[in-house]
Image: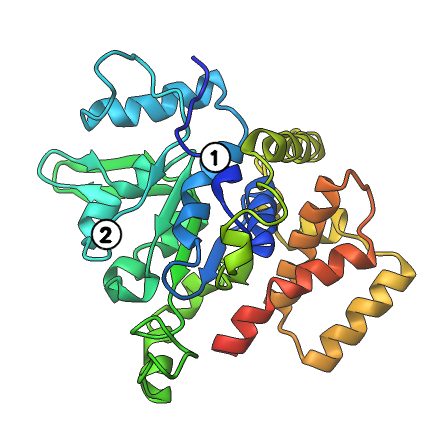
Amino acid sequence: MEETYDVDFRDIRGQLVLRRAAEIAAAGMHGLLMNGSAGTGKTMVAKRLPTIMPSLTREEDIEISKIYSICGLLPPDRPLLSRRPFRSPHHTITPLALTGGGAQARPGELSLASGGILFLDELPHFSRGAIDILRQPLEEHKVTVTRVHGSYEFPADFMLVAATNPCPCGFYPDRSRCSCSELQIQRYLDHIPRPVLERFDICVDASPVTYEELNGAGGTGEDSASIRRRVERARNIQAERFSGTRIRFNSRMGMKETQEYCTLGQEEGSFLKTVYETKQLSARRYHKILKVARTIADLDGCGLISRKHLSEALGYGMLEERLWG
């Protein structure tokens, strides 16, 4: 059965940078962190991400539907889910509800999001325990629940998407509405532990929408079907690149694969070397830039990473650098 959705990217006014970041994230399964005041469209973008991801394969549909069947969440009129999941648990959720478990072990939200999107809105408001519990599933793409009578393994292969406000009240830097102190803002942002923050290859600001954009100046935005076609082409390139390996997406490349598939020409290498030394980038940040640049090049249908691709990838790390250093 063909996937159908009630939402579409053409509904989003303005936010060209946010839309572009979402496309790149979907193409390479990169973690996406959006920062901005309430009402800037972060949740709208997140909810539309499944509409630009490739259609479910038969095998994916069966695996996802098994999880939903165990939890009694399959639609009564359909034997298969037939669409990519979008799970958005409230920030009061417990670590147990995320991972699953109970007397009769059942999948949690991380497994229900497998094959689709796990969206954590207002990420700093989640408990530290709930955020920390993400570390192993993000690394291994599965959840292991251990009980006295045995261990259970559930899939947890999702794309992590999160949103943050710029401060506890959500209005910074508008000091006519925000009275948060610098210390309060820093404590709020520091609630996200570094190992989880590092899982976001793409960090982007959601700017306020202008009156002209809200009222249709420049026409409606590009629809999901058009964006999905580009994402599918980029995914096909990755499928061919990683054929015969356990890797499926650019975001999952290790150091060995990054060195093999993200080689740079002399001009591009010189450019990135200058940036690396000038900004004193970490090795982690350097490899994130290369992986995102590889996905941007795939979207352009380019075998080689150009300076243009590197420059755009660098831009998606400026927010992390500005807020967390």
Residue found 42% across the figure and 22% down from its top: 4
Between the C-alphas of marks 2 and 1, the distance is: 23 Å
**Is residue 138 depicted above or below 56 in this figure?**
below
Give the label on residue 49, or none. Answer: none
Q: Position of residue 319 (x, y in %)?
A: 54, 70
2 or 1: mark nearer the eye = 1
Q: Amino acid at mark 1?
A: Asp
> Does label 2 or label 1 sit earlier along the sequence?
1
Residue 173 is drawn in which quadrant? bottom left
Bin the neighbour count of mark 1 within 10 Å (Cα to Cα): few under 14, some 14-19, many 20 and up.
many
Residue ID for mark 1: 8
**Is residue 169 depicted above or below 22 in this figure?**
below
Q: Is residue 125 left or right of residue 270?
A: left
Residue ID for mark 2: 90
Residue found 31% across the figure and 37% down from its top: 111
Q: Position of residue 97 (x, y in %)?
A: 19, 46
